[in-house]
Image (cartoon, helix red, strand yellow):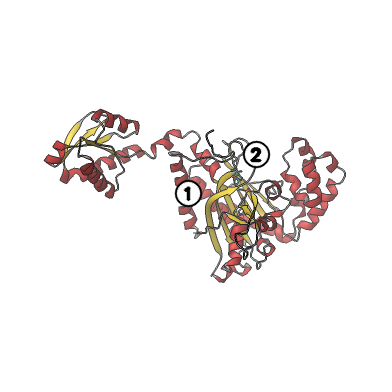
């Protein structure tokens, strides 16, 4: 039996990987304009980090984590429960605490790119190994970490990224889920409202009503939705300071031209959120249309044993970003990786001079695909054509002897001889006129 990639995981192949690289490169450029720097945390962590950070009652922790008991290898070691990271915010905050990053000047503005793991039911846009591009702003309150400026800034940064990647048809849904001080009154109201109706809801909701009533809003069971619709909204329970914070975020968004809609049912599936919570959805993606999500987590550092360090961040579902870009642009995807020149060594002993020429062209920044001296000319032309390359350089005995090369244009069928001394210049000018014609 052949071995296949595990359910919910997949191989990313060229040319699609070019698109992934473009997304990541563009994200790095945009993040750098906002003064974010990269952090890389381990792919697996102590299970407790997610239990305490993301929350025991969440779907992620209660059903979706890849957790195993890591055996001790020596008497000095202890067995430990480890988990493949289902998200990266808890890891970043752990690193913030572990390395006392608050001792560094100003706010910590950190971004990450990498795989995350959740045992969800796989479907289009939902995988068990998926990729996130995320960023977090975290720091002491005295560094301005609580300011609504931070919330508005990350949202505006995201819009710049969406625009640069030409992702259209998105909606920013925004809510405030209140602070730790306003949450108890809301939880109480939810419990009361659930009393008497929860028996008619799914078993998960019955459990949630006891452990963490806010999580009832994560329910996807269609029959439960009319009941959930009647539950009190968090917007009615915000205190004065929460409301002011939320108003200021919205005010800055209006000034910086970031369109949003308020959705006061948006609570997000992780327990650490306080105040601002948001999600971007995209029109072309179907059921899994949340392309990114995030929010504020003012109490997370303390929940993980650290100092007070309010923060805000987001994570982009990179798989879904790529899907949104690729929709209707398949031709663009495949042309990205077309090499620019094909070198055809012709006859025995020609591999070495051809390799030398390829090296010289590559040093000039020209992308080269190199054939083999055992190929007949016809085969070289066909190979170049299949790769979408129209310029073929023939390196044969006569060419080497006369110190010039034959350059064939497969599109026009024309062939000319170019002296070695002028060769690099000739190819470079052909390539730049080709590139500008393509851009026009
Ligand atoms: P999240 O909403 O759980 O938030 O995930 C963020 C994004 O990751 C989602 O909007 C979605 O695009 C993508 N995503 C999640 N699960 C899958 C999956 N199974 N397959 C494909 N894509 C998926 C977080 O992870 C928070 N850590 C975000 C954050 C950062 N909040 C504050 N800072």
- The spot of residue 68 in percent (x, y) is 65, 51
Estimate the spatial distance between the alpha carbons at disc 2 and disc 1, rounded to whole Å: 26 Å
- In front: 279, or 245? 279
Q: Which residue lies under the disc numbered 2?
A: 121
The residue sitting at 58% across, 50% down in the picture is 315
Determine the residue located farthest toward the right in the rendered image. Answer: 196
Q: What element carries label 1?
A: helix
**Left or right placement of residue 106 versus residue 21 in this view:** right
Q: Which numbered disc flags the more N-terminal residue, 2 or 1? A: 1
- As displayed, is residue 152 above or below residue 196? below
Q: Which quadrant is the C terminus positioned in?
A: top left
Determine the residue located farthest toward the left in the rendered image. Answer: 402
- As displayed, is residue 137 above or below residue 368? below
- The spot of residue 35 in percent (x, y) is 49, 60
Q: Are marks 2 and 1 in contact (CB under 8 Å)?
A: no
- The spot of residue 411 in percent (x, y) is 27, 29
Tell me, for residue 184, which label it has, or none. Answer: none
Q: Which residue lies under the disc numbered 1?
A: 24
- In front: 269, or 158? 269
């Amino acid at each position: 039996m052949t071995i296949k990639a595990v359910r919910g995981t997949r191989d990313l192949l060229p040319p699609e990987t070019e698109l992934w690289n473009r997304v990541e490169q563009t994200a790095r450029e945009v993040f750098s304009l906002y003064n974010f720097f990269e952090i890389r945390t381990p792919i697996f962590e102590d299970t407790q980090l997610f239990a305490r950070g993301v929350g025991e009652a969440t779907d992620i922790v209660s059903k979706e984590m890849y957790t195993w008991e890591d055996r001790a290898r020596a008497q000095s070691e202890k067995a430990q429960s480890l988990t493949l990271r289902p998200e990266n915010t808890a890891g970043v905050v752990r690193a913030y605490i572990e390395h006392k990053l608050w001792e560094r000047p100003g706010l910590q503005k950190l971004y990450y790119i990498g795989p995350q793991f959740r045992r969800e039911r796989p479907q289009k846009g939902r995988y068990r190994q998926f990729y996130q591009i995320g960023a977090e702003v975290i720091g002491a309150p005295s560094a301005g970490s609580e300011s609504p400026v931070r919330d508005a800034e990350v949202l505006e940064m995201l819009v710049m990224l969406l625009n640069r990647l030409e992702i259209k048809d998105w909606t920013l849904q925004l809510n405030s889920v209140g602070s730790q001080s306003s949450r108890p009154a809301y939880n109480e109201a939810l419990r009361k409202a659930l009393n008497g109706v929860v028996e008619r809801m799914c078993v998960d909701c019955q459990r949630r009503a006891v452990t963490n009533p806010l999580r009832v809003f994560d329910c996807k069971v269609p029959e439960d939705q009319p009941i959930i619709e009647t539950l009190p909204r968090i917007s009615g329970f915000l205190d004065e300071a929460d409301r002011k914070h939320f108003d200021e975020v919205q005010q800055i968004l209006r000034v910086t031209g970031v369109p949003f809609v308020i959705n006061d049912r948006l609570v997000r599936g992780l327990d650490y959120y306080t105040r601002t919570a948001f999600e971007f959805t995209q029109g072309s993606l179907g059921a899994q249309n949340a392309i990114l999500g995030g929010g504020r987590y003012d109490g997370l550092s303390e929940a993980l044993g650290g100092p007070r360090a309010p923060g805000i961040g987001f994570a982009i579902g990179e798989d879904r970003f790529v899907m949104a870009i690729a929709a209707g642009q398949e031709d663009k995807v495949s042309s990205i990786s077309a090499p620019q020149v094909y070198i055809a060594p012709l006859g025995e002993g020609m591999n070495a001079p051809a390799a030398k020429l390829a090296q010289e062209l590559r040093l000039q920044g020209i992308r080269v695909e190199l054939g083999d001296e055992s190929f007949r000319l016809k085969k070289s032309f066909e190979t170049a054509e299949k790769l979408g390359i129209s310029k073929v350089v023939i390196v044969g005995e006569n060419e080497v002897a006369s110190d010039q090369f034959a350059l064939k244009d497969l599109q026009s069928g024309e062939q000319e001889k170019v002296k070695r001394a002028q060769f690099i210049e000739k190819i470079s000018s052909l390539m730049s006129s080709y590139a500008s014609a393509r851009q026009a």
